[in-house]
Image (cartoon, helix red, strand yellow):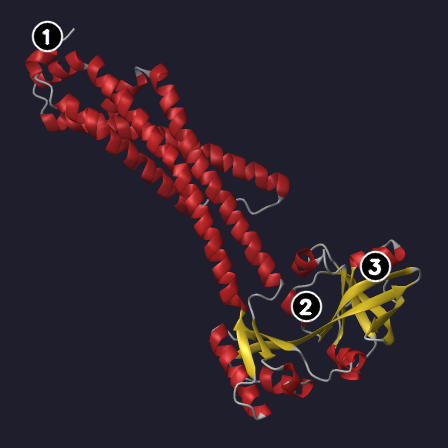
């Protein structure tokens, strides 16, 4: 405590000289933390969007489409497997939707009543598809609000009818629900190529396209199973049912999500390391400042040595001053980055959060840098000859 008190007193006597050094440290810490905050927010947003796309699932598909016999009759058995929490079908086809005086391309998705639990659709009006719609092969559909606006210039068009054409086959559908197209990650990723999405029962999709097979299954693993275990179990079950050895395969979308997150973490770490260079530069400024302080306090050091201060005391005093200098700049940088993150989160709604572990790690690194670069001037002070120091003017 005496070391800390003496170091604070010495630093307080030269506030004007310290201001630039403290600001340099604060800017370095601020830049590293802001990069970390932005990277963390990006990872959170991407993770959420990928989960909306079903990237927390395993997909099951046939290696050869012409041999695919996956049908609705297989769904109860797949859902009954202990490794499976939920299995939902998805079949797709490009079609053309016509209503009033508007016609446009749509991606026609054949799904069941569990589609909202896989793709995470946000319902705005009406209802989702129900089990009865799927069982009856009903001509009902759920559309996104952008398609609704194109038809009627409003979102709620529940009860209206539209005509969907796929491969020369046309059917009339009744709109039973409208979902938020802007909040759909699938829409955001493919919106430039596919204007809108239209969801119909997969049984109706089969009759519309003339294809009796389900293109793929989305499978969520049970709590006690991993996605890999669930994928292997379902693929093995379907292969036995089909009579082929390796017809059905699984793709673990969670692995793809993890790989993408690893890339993002690596980029954030690289940028943070670049920002950390400024902390090293700040360490050099600490060393320069403390070296000048040794020269200015030579006589003071001589007096301390004359009254019994040992070499280790002088060494610890100057090292403590350097560490406190780094600590004060680091705290200023942490406060600034935390305040900026809170303000930006309030304005944009993005998950911009300063993590305590990250702030603590940067703080320790900065203080360590200050201590390391303070060792040289501390050694200069500790090695001064007491007699020569007393005679220094």
Q: Please give the residue where the numbered disc 1 appears in the rendered image.
A: 391
- Would you place residue 221 above or below residue 101 in this image? below
Q: Which mark is residue 86?
A: none
Q: Please give the residue where the numbered disc 3 appears in the rendered image.
A: 148
Q: Nearer the viewer, residue 60 or 325?
A: 60
- Residue at the location (28% across, 37% down)? 368
Question: Which callout, 2 or 1, points at the residue further toward the start of the chain?
Answer: 2
Q: As drawn, is 6 to the left or to the right of 364? A: left
- Residue at the location (90% across, 64% down)? 99
Q: Please give the residue where the numbered disc 2 appears in the rendered image.
A: 116
Question: From mark 2 to mark 1, how far is it between C-alphas?
Answer: 84 Å
What is the quadrant of residue 89 in the picture?
bottom right
Bin the neighbour count of mark 3 within 10 Å (Cα to Cα): few under 14, some 14-19, many 20 and up: many
Q: As drawn, is 337 to the left or to the right of 362? A: right
Bin the neighbour count of mark 1 within 10 Å (Cα to Cα): few under 14, some 14-19, many 20 and up: few
- Residue at the location (44% across, 43% down)? 271
């Amino acid at each position: 405590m005496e070391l800390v008190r003496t170091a604070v007193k010495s630093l307080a006597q030269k506030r004007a000289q310290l201001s630039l050094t403290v600001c340099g440290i604060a800017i370095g810490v601020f830049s590293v933390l802001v990069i970390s905050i932005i990277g963390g927010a990006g990872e959170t947003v991407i993770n959420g969007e990928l989960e909306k796309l079903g990237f927390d699932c395993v997909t099951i598909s046939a290696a050869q489409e012409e041999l695919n016999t996956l049908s609705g009759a297989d769904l109860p058995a797949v859902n009954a497997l202990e490794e499976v929490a939920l299995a939902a079908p998805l079949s797709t086809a490009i079609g053309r939707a016509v209503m009033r005086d508007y016609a446009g391309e749509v991606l026609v998705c054949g799904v069941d009543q569990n589609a909202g639990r896989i793709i995470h659709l946000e319902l705005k009006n009406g209802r989702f598809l129900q089990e009865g719609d799927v069982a009856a092969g009903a001509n009902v559909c759920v559309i996104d609000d952008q398609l609704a606006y194109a038809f009627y210039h409003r979102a709620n068009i529940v009860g209206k009818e539209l005509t969907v054409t796929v491969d020369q086959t046309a059917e009339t559908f009744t709109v039973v629900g409208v979902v938020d197209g802007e909040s759909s990650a699938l829409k955001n990723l493919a919106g430039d190529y596919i204007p809108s999405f239209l969801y119909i029962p997969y049984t109706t999709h089969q009759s519309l396209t003339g294809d009796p097979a389900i293109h793929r299954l989305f499978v969520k693993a049970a709590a006690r199973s991993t996605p890999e275990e669930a994928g292997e179990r379902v693929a093995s079950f379907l292969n036995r049912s089909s009579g082929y050895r390796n017809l059905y395969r699984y793709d673990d979308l969670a692995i793809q999500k993890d790989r993408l997150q690893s890339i993002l973490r690596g980029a954030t770490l690289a940028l943070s390391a670049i920002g950390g260079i400024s902390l090293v530069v700040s360490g050099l400024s600490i060393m320069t400042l403390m070296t000048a302080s040794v020269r200015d306090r030579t006589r003071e050091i001589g007096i301390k040595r004359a009254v019994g201060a040992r070499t280790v005391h002088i060494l610890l005093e100057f090292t403590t001053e350097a560490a406190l200098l780094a600590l004060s700049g680091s705290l200023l940088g942490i406060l600034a980055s935390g305040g900026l993150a809170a303000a930006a989160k309030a304005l944009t709604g993005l998950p911009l959060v300063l993590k305590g572990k990250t702030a603590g790690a940067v703080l320790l690194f900065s203080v360590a840098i200050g201590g390391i670069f303070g060792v040289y001037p501390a050694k200069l002070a500790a090695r001064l000859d007491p007699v020569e120091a007393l005679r220094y003017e």
